[in-house]
Image: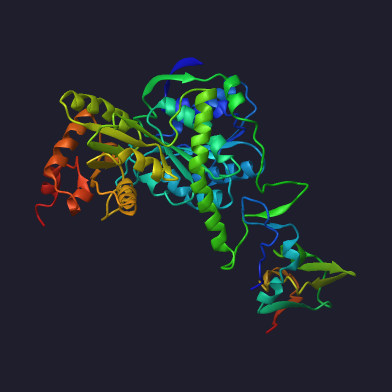
């Protein structure tokens, strides 16, 4: 175990090479470029036998790694924002053909208006394409998650592709100390890649990714959905194994001072580590507040979340993305979970931090203040725009 | 529409795949509205039609062009490519 000062992008590049990836294809896009840049440098300086293809588009980049995984080698790609949207067609082939590959998504808002800064709208727009989705809270978790993701994706009961998401700039470009496990420890944890699924085999040729008419199509979708659901247990199993053999890693969810909390703040990604500081401060004032961070958004860990929130009086759900006219995607998941489980907890959905708007420790206190003023079960409590500038909105709409 | 069977699928996970040579059974000739008819007197055996056919439905047998009507979808590329107008598309309906 050696400690280095790495950005999130650099930590992911280290993890990719530790995982013994032999095929990488990518197209540069801010803020993901640092991953590919670092990988190219490391492959050259360490003289590694890893294929690195600079594709002509993201559609090609994903298609190339689909092909190389089907050809029998562990593969990796990374993208952001518009690049992820361009991959969307090929992404359904990846899950439909049950291809176990890992992709890093450095979250960035979508155009227009053009932005390079972070929110979760890009990966949320790919929510239903059958991939697993992990949201990391820091560079260390990004590194550990990439390595565990290969083992989860390649598990016989799963065999699905995985997106590992980190917040653009907040994680991708800020450096912090990251412990890099030894290659020996990783080799002990992650075996060599074997194609244990229908793949390209010269001795047993087949057509892959073929058509299925109405008499078969639904069965394929059913089994894919079952595999995604089964992945919950596999993620727990693999994360435990990683924690024993390499270092501690969060599996599905993590909590912070939530066991006795009356108000639990729920959210994804890097903003949750910022809010830990806010929670400490509020606890100092005697407020019973805690955090629940969802690391694994697909499959959605319903039971694990229920276990943590059942004692809470109020839930505040933070979304850095939006399902227009309704609410944030995390809010929609949690409120449907509460409804089906019969739990009666007041739920508040906050939209914040879009297009890279900063979430600071002050945001935490502002959240609590607002929650105390609001009444539950109203439209406003489903999507309260926490940090929108109402003066700007008023100025822009003054002529209407 | 030909039935596609997935009865060979006994592997878990079920990725949609078919055994090799599946296309040999798929009678794409049924899709055709027109199929080529060859005038051997005009044919100079340049084999441009054989090269251009996207379905490999043109064979060269006994020194003559022969259209495989089981596979020919009737796209008409051979008619356009033929330099001597030896190929004309005719209705097969």
Front one among A346 and A143 = A346
Instruction: Name above or below for residue A310 compared with residue A128.
Output: above
Q: Quadrant where the C terminus of chain A lies?
A: bottom left
Residue B21 versus residue A75 in the image, above or below: below
> In the image, is residue A73 above or below residue A208?
above
From the viewer's perspective, tell me whether residue A356 is left or right of residue B41: left
Residue A213 in view of the camera: yes
Judge by depth and name the residue closer to the eye, A127 or B89.
A127
Residue at 35%, 31% (x, y): give it. Answer: A169
In this rendering, the answer to whether B5 lies above or below A51 is: below
- B33 or A205, which is in the foreground? A205
Q: Nearer the viewer, residue A381 or B57?
A: A381
Give the image location of residue A55, x and y in percent: 55, 40
Residue A66 percent coordinates (x, y): 59, 45
Residue A238 horizontal side relative to residue A392, left or right: right
Is residue A205 left or right of A217 when viewed as pictured? right
Image quadrant assignment for residue A360:
top left
Left or right placement of residue A348 versus residue A79 in this view: left
State whether residue A359 appears in this view: no
| Residue that appears at 14% across and 45% down | A374
Q: Residue furthest right?
A: B62
Where residue A215 appears, as percent x and y from the top left, is 59, 68
Residue A253's quadrant in the figure?
A: top left
Residue plotted at (64% across, 44% down): A70
- Say how many tags the image has: 0
List x then y, in percent, for residue A263. 22, 37
Going by the picture, which residue comes out furthest to the left? Answer: A398
Q: How is the image coloured?
A: rainbow
């Amino acid at each position: 175990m050696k400690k280095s000062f790495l950005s999130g992008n650099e930590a992911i590049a280290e993890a990719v090479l530790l995982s013994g990836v032999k095929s990488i294809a990518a197209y540069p896009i801010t803020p993901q470029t640092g991953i590919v840049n670092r990988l190219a440098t490391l492959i050259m300086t360490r003289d590694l036998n890893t294929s690195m293809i600079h594709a002509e588009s993201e559609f090609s980049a994903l298609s190339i790694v689909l092909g190389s995984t089907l050809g029998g080698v562990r593969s990796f790609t990374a993208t952001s924002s518009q690049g992820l949207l361009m991959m969307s067609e090929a992404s359904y082939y990846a899950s439909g053909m049950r291809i176990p590959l890992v992709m890093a998504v450095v979250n960035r808002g979508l155009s227009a208006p053009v932005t390079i800064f972070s929110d979760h709208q890009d990966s949320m727009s790919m929510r239903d394409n059958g991939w697993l989705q992990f949201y990391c809270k820091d560079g260390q978790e990004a590194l550990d998650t990439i390595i565990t993701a290969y083992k989860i994706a390649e598990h016989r009961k799963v065999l699905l592709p995985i997106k590992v998401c980190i917040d653009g700039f907040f994680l991708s470009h800020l450096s912090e100390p990251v412990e890099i496990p030894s290659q020996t420890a990783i080799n002990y944890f992650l075996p060599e890649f074997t194609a244990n699924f229908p793949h390209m085999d010269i001795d047993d040729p087949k057509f892959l990714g073929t058509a299925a008419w109405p008499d078969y199509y639904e069965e394929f979708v059913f089994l894919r959905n079952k595999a995604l659901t089964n992945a919950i247990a596999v993620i727990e199993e693999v994360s435990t194994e990683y924690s024993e053999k390499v270092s501690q890693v969060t599996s599905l969810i993590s909590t912070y001072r939530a066991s006795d909390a009356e108000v639990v703040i729920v959210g994804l990604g890097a903003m949750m580590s910022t809010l830990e500081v806010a929670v400490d401060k509020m606890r100092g004032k005697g407020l019973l507040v805690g955090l629940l961070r969802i690391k694994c958004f697909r499959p959605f860990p319903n039971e694990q979340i229920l276990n943590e929130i059942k004692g809470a009086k109020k839930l505040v759900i933070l979304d850095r993305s939006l399902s227009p006219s309704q609410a944030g995607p995390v809010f929609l998941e949690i409120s449907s979970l509460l409804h089906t489980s019969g739990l009666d907890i007041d739920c508040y959905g906050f939209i914040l931090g879009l297009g890279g708007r900063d979430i600071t420790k002050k945001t935490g206190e502002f959240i609590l203040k607002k929650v105390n003023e609001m009444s539950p079960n109203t439209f406003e409590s489903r999507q309260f725009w926490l940090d929108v500038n109402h003066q700007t909105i008023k100025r822009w709409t003054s002529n209407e | 529409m030909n039935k596609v069977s997935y009865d060979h699928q006994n592997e878990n996970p079920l990725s949609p795949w078919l055994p090799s040579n599946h296309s040999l059974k798929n009678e794409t000739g049924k899709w055709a509205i027109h199929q080529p008819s060859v005038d051997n007197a005009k044919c100079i055996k340049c084999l441009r039609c054989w090269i251009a056919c996207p379905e490999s439905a043109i064979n060269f047998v006994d020194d003559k062009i022969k259209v495989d009507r089981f596979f020919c979808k009737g796209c008409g590329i051979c008619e356009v490519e033929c330099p001597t107008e030896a190929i004309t598309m005719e209705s097969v309906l």
